[in-house]
Image (tube, coloured by chain):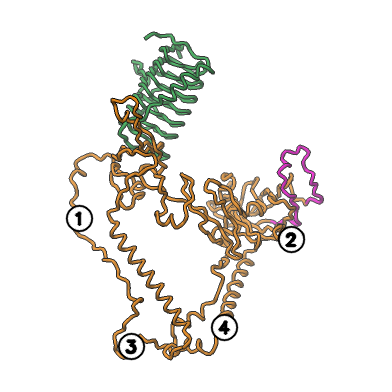
Chain colours: A green, B orange
Amino acid sequence: MSKNSIKIFPGAIVCEEAKLRGDITVGSGTIIHPCATIVAEAGPIIIGEQCLIEEQAKIVHRLPLDQQNKENTPVLIIGSHNVFEVGCTVEALKIGNNNVFEAKCFVGNKVTVTNGCTFGTGCVVTDEQILKENVSIFGAKCHMRESLDKPAPQTLQMETLVKLLPNYHHIRKPNCKH
Amino acid sequence: MSYITGPEVVSYACTCGLIKPLPKLYFCRHCSQIRCSFCVCSEVDSIFCGKCSENIPSAEATMKKNRCANCLICPSCQQELSTRIASKGPANPTDAKSPIKKTYYLSCYFCRWNSRDVGIPDQPSATGGWPQRDNVHSHRLQDVVDSYKQIMLSQKHKKEHDKKKKIGKFVSYTDRTGVTASALRKKIGIPDTPHALLKKPKMPEPAVASNDVDELPEHLITTPLNLMDITTVEQRLLQPESQPLTVDKLFPVRKQLSIKKSLRCRCCERNVSKPEFNPSSVKFKIQLFAYFHIPEVRIVSLSPLVEGVPSELILKFTNPTQHQTTITLLNLDLAEQENYVKELTVSEVAECLEHSLSLQSKQPGSLTSISVGSGSQPSSLLSLTPRQPSITVKPRKIEQHVNCDVEMPEGAFVLPPRDDAAEYDESSDVHNVEHDPKHVVWRKSNKAFIKLLVVPNANLQANQDVVCGFSMEHIYTNILVATMENKQPQKSHHRVRIFFNLGKITRE
């Protein structure tokens, strides 16, 4: 594993206790809690704006076995306004905007997540697929349904965290300019 | 807890002959007998809504078809729906001071279904007024319900009519001979004119089966199927009146009410379990669970089972009561139980006969004997049915096959009373039980490990479960009588049959 290179845009709150490995870019307004794990193993990870990554969440960029050993290194791009709740594990190939990964869900590395999707608590999604927009997966049997609009953004929660987190944690300094 | 007691490894035989694990059994203190869910009477104690925790009187519940008036559940995932606020700009955009207009819609936090998905308009008030959907078949249902109500009424009238007839001071000649007026009429050939109240109730028009079926829509074959648009079986059955085929016809459903039930011993008609009335409380007013009265037995260890070879079984006995008990292990003796059941049924039949005979002899005059002779229905039936307690439970034979012998240890052992503080007491084992028999391996406070030898039958198949069992006799201290009559606690010997599923035999 090469040296860590972490780029943080102004306005992002990245706690020092967060475990970041590899080449990671964090967009402005994104909050990364302590003890969140982000591993850029197969290539760089770019996280968009206003994402919320809670503690014990794991974002791993790891390619499926059949796609490894290719020449060009793929980039995992995570869009804006995504919420990664406590204890989720996300290895998806591509993540759009306004998705919610609820607590303890697992998304495998063959899944492409578009926009406005919800992965319910404890749901395990591993099959190769491109999810439609605004799909929510819920329940022990991973039922799927399509809703009309995207899940509501967590603005209130994020505003509180922006104020609270710096009071109790060491924050990494932003090292990039707009 | 359920991972220890849940799997049916150790099961106890109920007085009625069924076999269940200890946490599923009750113990009636008045009869000093074990009862299970099949030999108690269940009664509805209170009806409540699980979401708003409100008690609802049974009459009101019947009127509302056992559904809560305020709470709705999600038609997509059957979880409870919650109301969410959506603010729509100020009512009067030109006036800055006008209050922001709030509207409410329903949303499910679990599957993200919301009332806007199916086009239900937002409501101005939080408490609802959600549009009710009319049942297409409501008229037909009303017809059927009405006709059944009529049947009920006419039967009631008939009963009253019959009663009046019987009470009548003067016994008519036709009643004595068993030839009724209507029978006479038939004999003579006059058409039978029934009593006005006894008229046959009008039945609703029978449903007609139709042969006309819509043709198969072509789009079913031509367009690809989108499974996300189609409802699941659970979703359809949740709304039996409409049974929607597609998800855009899913409408919120009123939440079904729950009940709290109390259980009554069928022999003494006293409660063995009674919950607290308050719907938000999970406690009991009366809880006579066997778990608090009968010593609990668990398997500690078992050496590999080989057919025909003795292996060592260590059991842990726990005394759950506040009184010292003495446990004696006895042979299972299923034949004895079978005989007991047989004797009981024989004695019951005899009792019934005696009862009915005495009833007959008590009847004034020779009315009944005549009616029995002539075969007139009502009076003869009355005298023959024995008057028994409302519901009785007949014990059954214990249907449990045992294929493993247990070598019974000699002598009894003592279990000291349960002491909750003993766990924190470093210098434990104050109860030094003297003359501990050889088979007691270990003991601490109210628990003891007992070593037994089990011998699986020689002709066992490899895939067969090895089951052994024994009778446990323990001394049960009944404090109920003591508190009621200011006497010493009554001690009695209580015997229960216990079965162990020891797993499969090991092959070398």
Left or right placement of residue B377 versus residue B497 in this view: left
Within-10-Å neighbours for mark 4: few <14, some 14–19, many 20+:
some
Disc 1 designates what residue? B213
What percent of the width, then of the height, locates residue B133?
Answer: 30, 48
Which mark, by number, is residue B490?
2
SS state under label 3: helix
- Amino acid under label 2? Gln
Q: Where is residue B200 in the image (x, y as percent from the top left)?
A: 32, 74
Give the Cα distance between marks 1 and 2.
75 Å
- Is B427 within the magenta? yes
The amino acid at mark 3 is Arg
N-terminal label among 1 and 3: 3
Question: Which of the two labelled residues, at mark 3 and mark 4, occupies the earlier sequence position?
Answer: 3
Q: Position of residue A140 (x, y in %)?
A: 43, 39
Q: Which of marks 2 and 3 is in front?
A: 3
In percent of the image, x 60 and y 61: which residue is there?
B270
Mark 2 and mark 3: Cα distance apart in space? 68 Å
Q: What element carries label 4?
A: helix
Q: Mark 4 points at which residue?
A: B357
Query: Which of the 4 quarters of the picture holds residue A39?
Result: top left
In the rendered structure, which amino acid carries the disc numbered 1?
A: Val
The part of the chain drawn in magenta is B407-436
Query: Which circle, 1 or 2, is nearer the viewer?
Result: 2
Classify B224 as above or below B307: above
Q: Are marks 1 and 2 in contact (CB under 8 Å)?
A: no
Mark linked to residue B382: none
Q: Are marks 1 and 3 in contact (CB under 8 Å)?
A: no
